[in-house]
Amino acid sequence: MLTQITSDKDLVTNYLKGDNSSFEFLLNRHKNKVFSYIISKVKNRDLAEDIFQDTFVKVINSLQKGRYNEEGKFLPWMMRIAHNLIIDYFRRSNKMKNIRSTDDFNIFDILNDGARSQEEDMIRKRIHVDLKLLIDLLPLEQKDVIKLRYFEDKSFKEIASLTNVSINTALGRMRYALINLRSLSQERKVDLSYK
């Protein structure tokens, strides 16, 4: 019997063993937070519902392909998938700013619609300063791949070519960079979440 105290980890394990009700329970547990986050970024209910559906399709596919591990928590992992799908949407619709490496670069600047309050701007600026400091602590190869991907908008094929490595190596460096950023933020008690 599934209850509110059943952990996300146990629900994922049960789902992977064939218990579809465990995934439904996970979905019901987290859907409001995920949907609220998406709609806060895209400000369009229909679009938010589409991205919400795509998020859960990607979550299911990733779980079934064994691309989820318990390094982090389930909800932050799912929110990252939603965040990446939002970024993909804005890139496709050419509404995303072209991010370039500068002294005050902004890895998560998706869209400036002019509607942000001063408080939101201050929070974003703090997060970006903290993030820049953490990125500077990464090993050189990881720092390079982060900057090329997020600040110069290079594809992994271009990154591989520019750094003279295989695409798999470039992807691996990105993965380790993100893992290390998460560890550094926890270790230094830096909150990179935008609430």
Image: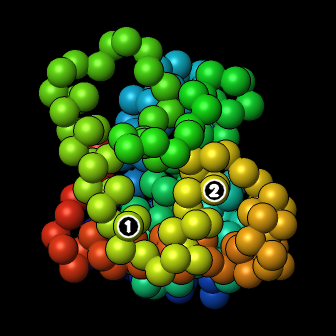
Q: Which residue is mark 2?
A: 148
Any mark on residue 2, and which?
none
Residues packed near mark 1 inside 10 Å, few (<14), some (14 to 19) or many (20 plus): few
Mark 2 neighbour class, 10 Å CA radius: few under 14, some 14 to 19, many 20 or more = many
- Residue at horizontal 68 percent and vertical 33 percent from the top: 91
Residue 136 is labelled as 1
Instruction: Judge from the rendering whether residue 34 lies leftward or rightward of residue 160; answer left or right.
Output: left
| 111 shown above or below 137 | above
In x, y percent, where is residue 88? 66, 41
User: Residue 62, position in %: x, y?
Assistant: 67, 70
- At numbered mark 1, what does the secondary structure look like: helix, strand or loop? helix
Residue 17 falls in image quadrant: bottom right
Report how far apart the C-alphas of labels 2 and 1 lie in the structure.
14 Å
Tag 2–tag 1 contact (CB < 8 Å): no
Which quadrant: the N terminus?
Answer: bottom left
Quick check: can you spot residue 23?
Answer: no
- Say what secondary structure mark 2 lies in: helix
Across and down, in percent, residue 21 comes to 55, 68
Between 4 and 167, the one nearer to me in the picture: 167
Q: Nearer the viewer, residue 110 or 23?
A: 110
> Which is nearer the N-term, disc 2 or disc 1?
1
Q: Nearer the viewer, residue 5 or 163?
A: 163
Residue at 30% over, 76% down: 184
Identify which amino acid the numbered label 1 is placed on. Answer: Asp
Q: Is residue 21 above or below residue 139?
A: above
The structure's colour scheme is: rainbow
Q: Looking at the picture, how far across and down is residue 6, in whole percent?
A: 33, 78
Q: Quadrant of residue 120?
A: top left
Q: Amino acid at mark 2?
A: Leu
Q: Residue at x 60, y 71 (%)?
A: 174
